[in-house]
Image: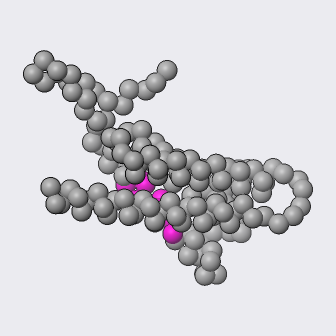
């Protein structure tokens, strides 16, 4: 069953598709920008060896929540959800595809780190944070370009 995120209104005997309500779009946009900033903040702490405001192996109850893996994955989920809510554009589709890839890398990283019992070098976490950085930069660039285009209209 598909969720209808659009309402249809009747204008001059034609059905016109109106996007989902403004509060949903605003909430998604704000959470997307906050998560993008959080990804860049976590990456700066990770790669610059800054003091981390969380423990080495953080958990919520018994669930491990490593910010280097969870925050990019959450950003990927929000970007994919926003692509379904917003109007269709090539940029949103490409961001959503990359967001889905980032989410898959994040979940595979968490699985590999916490569920697999074998040893070895853990590289997938590095790819997760790099994908998160690229996605965050793409989110910020898309927001800047979209707001600049609205100002020019």
Image coloring type: one colour
Residue lying furthest top:
13
Is residue 31 located in the magenta-colored stretch of the structure?
yes
Residue 82 vertical position relative to residue 132 in the rendered view, above or below: above
Q: Position of residue 127 (x, y in %)?
A: 66, 63
Instruction: Tell me what residue is drawn at x 13 percent, y 18 percent.
Output: 13
Is residue 22 located in the magenta-colored stretch of the structure?
no
Instruction: Tell me what residue is drawn at x 78 percent, y 54 percent.
Output: 112
Instruction: Tell me what residue is drawn at x 52 percent, y 64 percent.
Output: 134
Q: Position of residue 92 (x, y in %)?
A: 41, 48
Q: Position of residue 133 (x, y in %)?
A: 53, 66
Given residues 105 and 22, the one toward you in this image is: 105
Quadrant in the picture for the C terminus: bottom left
Residue lying furthest left:
12
Given residues 93 and 69, the one toward you in this image is: 93
The answer to whether residue 64 shows anywhere in this view is no
- Tell me: 12 left or right of 36: left
Residue lying furthest right:
118
Instruction: Tell me what residue is drawn at x 28 percent, y 27 percent.
Output: 7
Q: Quadrant of residue 44?
A: bottom right
Residue 75 vertical position relative to residue 83 in the rendered view, above or below: below
Q: Position of residue 25 (x, y in %)?
A: 33, 44
Q: Quadrant of residue 130?
A: bottom right
Classified by dominant secondary structure, the portion drawn in magenta counts as helix
The answer to whether residue 68 shows anywhere in this view is yes
User: Which residues lie in the magenta part?
Assistant: 30-40
């Amino acid at each position: 069953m598909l969720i209808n995120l659009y309402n249809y209104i009747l204008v001059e005997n034609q059905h016109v598709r109106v996007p989902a309500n403004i509060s949903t779009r605003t909430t998604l946009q704000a959470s997307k920008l906050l998560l993008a900033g959080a990804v860049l903040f976590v990456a700066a702490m990770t790669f610059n060896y800054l003091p981390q405001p969380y423990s080495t192996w953080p958990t919520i109850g018994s669930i491990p929540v490593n910010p280097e893996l969870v925050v990019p994955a959450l950003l990927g989920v929000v970007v994919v959800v926003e692509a379904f809510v917003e109007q269709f554009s090539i940029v949103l589709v490409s961001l959503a595809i990359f967001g889905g890839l980032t989410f898959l890398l994040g979940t595979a990283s968490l699985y590999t780190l916490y569920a697999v019992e074998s040893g070895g070098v853990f590289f997938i976490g590095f790819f997760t944070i790099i994908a998160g950085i690229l996605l965050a930069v793409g989110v910020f660039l898309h927001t800047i370009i979209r707001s600049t285009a609205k100002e020019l209209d």
